[in-house]
Image (cartoon, grey):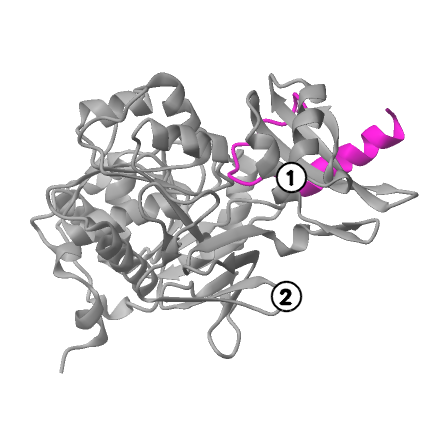
Amino acid sequence: MPTKAELYVPASLFSNENPLWGASAKVAGYMVRNRISRVGICLQPGRQAVEVLLGCVYAGASACMLSMRWPGAAVNQALGQLGIEYAFTTRTDLEVECLDPAVCYAEKPHIADVGSYEDVATIVYTSGSSATPKAVAHSLENHVTSAQSACAALDLGSSDRWLLSLPLWHVSGISIVFRCSIAGARIVIPDPGMSLIEALSNYQITHVSMVPTQLIRVLEQAQKPPRHLRSVIVGGGPMPQGVLKMAINKGWPIRTTYGMTETTSMVTLSNKNPSPGSSGHVLQGNELKIAGDGEILVRSQAVCLGYLNDDTIVNIADDDGWLHTGDLGRFDENGEFYVLGRKDNMFISGGENISPEEIEYALCDVHGVQKAVVVPVPDPEFGQRPIAFIKGSAKFKDLERILNRELPRFKIPKYYPWPEHIQSHSLKPDRKLFAELAFQLQKNP
């Protein structure tokens, strides 16, 4: 009778035919010899970061993925909270023992018994829609389940090349590594400083993951996609429908998706040329339903172990295994799935429910708008009303005119320019920060 690990873990993940196997197995050997069971990884996206990540998998150790964009104080706080004493990094501002991956390359290769299949494999911080991102614990089972469903939907194979276009401190970046390792596809790591469009063309890329901002930049540089490109997976934030339409009209093979750190990346995926606003259909191995209040619930072996607090894992699924995502969504009559916004972002103005994301989607469709964040401010007449911060060249009077055609009057916001001091690299805006700023602007116009 095969073990659970044998049933789920593809041999390709641990095969010495994997080009990354040798260096990764030596990293594992170093960690085993030094009895390191949990380690921080704070490296720029690149070959060493991938080798260290897989080395942790081979050693049966937990890899805590930390952003190079975080200040030293934030990284040190995360390391301290999780009791981590070692970190693979090139930084000099960390208060733990810093390891250079190169010191591991003289070690003997090591592959652990895969009995740690349900233990913590990675720790990934949420992308930070609040000031306190959460440490999400994933098992090897979570990653493999997610990767297998994605590989099946994308028909990913050994002749394919996936560009590592996202950092490994996001679950979407880690997912590229697991998908390619399982399918035998190549992980292509671009040269530093090379633009995304250059990498897509020069390396004959077949698959790439992008956030909407990356797609916008690519479309500004190229009319048509490189001929080898088969799938552009777009997630990580609201997709302006004007940008989506432009990409499809230019022949880019766009596929939209829905997922989050807690679901170990995507749980839905569209076909090429998706309907406006659609996130596609539910992937094999996942269950998704809409609760009575419109909240999206997900159940899957890819749902994370929980949030890590010191050495305690706090389960975040209910008694029946459903993850309450906090997002609002719906299915249409054809079974296509649509995300409507965050449940906890909703507010009431004059007795009417307002979703900030609905207004943001409409604003981002206007030519000249790069980013938009909508938050409520107190109002003596309506209780609350919407305020929009706009980044880009669009004129406020044009926004007012266009949105008056798209939205009811009570959803038309007052506009402010994007604050110069806010240059967040997070995939999600810090709405609390924007709300505080809006409140101050209302008090002192």
Residue 72 percent across, percent down from the top left:
52, 35
In the image, 397 versus 234, the foreground residue is 397
Note whether residue 317 is visible. yes
In the image, 183 versus 53, the foreground residue is 183
Residue 247 occupies quadrant: top left
Q: Is tag 1's residue or tag 2's residue first in the polypeptide sequence?
A: 2
**Extent of the magenta region:** 418-445
Residue 298 percent across, percent down from the top left:
46, 65
Q: In which quadrant is the N terminus drawn?
A: bottom left
Q: What residue is drawn where x is 66% and y is 55%?
A: 344
Residue 20 percent across, percent down from the top left:
16, 43
Q: Is residue 333 magenta?
A: no
Q: Is residue 111 left or right of residue 283?
A: left
Residue type at mark 1 is Ile
- The residue singled out by tag 2 in the image is 293
Residue type at mark 2 is Asp
Q: What residue is drawn where x is 10% and y is 54%?
A: 15
- The residue singled out by tag 1 in the image is 359
Is residue 165 shown above or below 335?
above
Q: What residue is drawn where x is 55% and y is 46%?
A: 77
